[in-house]
Amino acid sequence: MLPSANKVYVAVKALFTPDAPLKPLSITWEDGTEYEIEEVLDVCRAASLKAGGAGIRYSVRIGKTMTYLFLEESNWFVERRTRR
Amino acid sequence: MPMPDRSILHVDVNACYASIELLHRPELRGLPVAVGGDAEARHGIILAKSEEAKAFGIKTGEVLWQARQKCPNLVVLKPNYQLYLRFSRMLRELLVDYTDQVESFGLDECWLDVTGSTHLFGSGTEIAEKIRERVKRELGVTVSVGASFNKVFAKLGSDMKKPDAVTAIGREDYKEKVWPLPAEELLYVGRSTKHRLNKYGIFTIGDIARADPALLQSWFGKWGLVLNWFSNGMDSSPVARAGDEAVIKSIGNSTTTPRDLTCEQDAKIIFYMLSESVASRLREAGFRCKTVQISLRDNELFSFERQMILSQPSCISGELCVAAMKLLRGNYSWQKPLRSIGIRGCDLVPVGAPAQLTLLEDENQRIRREQLEHTVDDIRRRFGHYSIGRAVNHLDTTLGRIDPKGDHTIHPIGFFRAM
């Protein structure tokens, strides 16, 4: 099954510690640019109707932008932002 | 003091396979979409359909070409069972937040007994609403939930309003809500029971409820009484605890073959493959079977079953297949080709159970054959199903390439397994 056009799989650097939940540190976008995650605002199970999928949703702040980062099984994806 | 009523929920994922596919394929939303079996392998039937496809009159179980006649633009997707199993697991993980009594009924339906959780989360209907909202938010698919005081009415409730809805059926209103429904809506009233009921002038669930139980019993035996109890809300079957494994009563496999079977040789190829799968599953579960049953269905979809008792309990594929072929020879004259055949091992006994040996068979030979089959299991586990096989499979390349054990199978589940 091909992923939908709005589903962008990304590389994620994350911190695994014995006594704290998994913490994503940075996202590497399709073009190779790495963005640092400055803050994880919320973590919950959620579906992404826009990208198509379901898993654990991290609400993260990158610079001034808030975005969703999904962990689906062992893959990370984000919803593509489209210009209106 | 009478026991207070239980709070039972039945959660049903709406158009499960199609909804999961549409979640992952946003570009197809709004189009008539169905999930269908593989037409080339002749499993070409509709397994699930979207609301838009339903509007064209497409029904589950319908063959693909018929569905395409009703809706030429129908988008048919191949099933992805691994994905559906993942969603089924996620649904259960969500449901066990509310109770440990979660009993699955197939991949997409569950019963919950939330009687003990109402002081934590609110009434049955309130819990049902929470579940409905959470499933939509967390899994991206919708569910219908029935809330009632027994399992049978809870299941009826989940069928009443679809999609994304909660229906409560209480002791005070079940007569208004349940009794006007057609008799076949009741669990265990299938097509043939429906016809017989109709013949006796019974058309609704209320008719069954009001009928004389003795009369129902004279028509249907003990099932007549069960239907009468069900329709009067007297179902007291418990909801199994999450993780309780069903007691295995039999192990079987059947297949619709890639082409019709026209002679004994064809049937032998398939029976060997199915026997290997059944025998391997028996060994995996630690059982031998005392009875072998075969099911046959011809190309006009007429089907029947026959069974025989083995001289010794067995989990050796060769012995199961010999029994199956004997049953076939004794009961089928090949007037019509066969479309689908199956084999089942019943009357299971644990491997360690004592068995009466016979003087006529060499038990050492049987032990060696069983060890040989364990070795085959091991080779297949390590190197794949097709790494080793019987020569008979190579007699026909179309028929010989089926892996009944590894290919997806959903085994039917009985309602009474928890009782």
Image (cartoon, coloured by chain):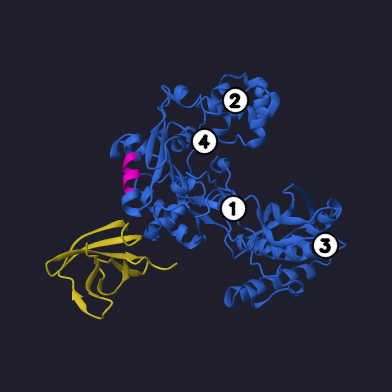
| Circle 2 residues within 10 Å: few <14, some 14–19, many ≥20 | some
Question: Could you give the CA–CA distance between mark 4 and mark 3, rounded to whole angstroms?
Answer: 45 Å
Amino acid on which disc 3 is placed: Glu
Label 3 and label 2 in one chain: yes
Q: Colour of chain A?
A: yellow
Q: Residues within 10 Å of mark 1 (few under 14, many from 20)?
A: few
Check disc 3 and report the residue beneath it.
Answer: B264
Task: Name which quarter of the figure residue A74 lies in.
Answer: bottom left
* Apparent side of residue B271 relative to residue A40 in the rendered image (left or right): right
Cα distance in 3D space between marks 3 and 2? 45 Å
Placement of B136 over or under A21, stated as above or below: above
User: What is the distance, in whole Å, between disc 1 and disc 2 at their CAs?
Assistant: 31 Å
At numbered mark 3, what does the secondary structure look like: helix, strand or loop? helix
Badge 1 element: loop
Label annotation for residue B237: 4
CA–CA distance between discs 3 and 1?
27 Å
Q: Does label 1 lie on the same chain as label 4?
A: yes
> What residue is drawn where x is 85% and y is 64%?
B361
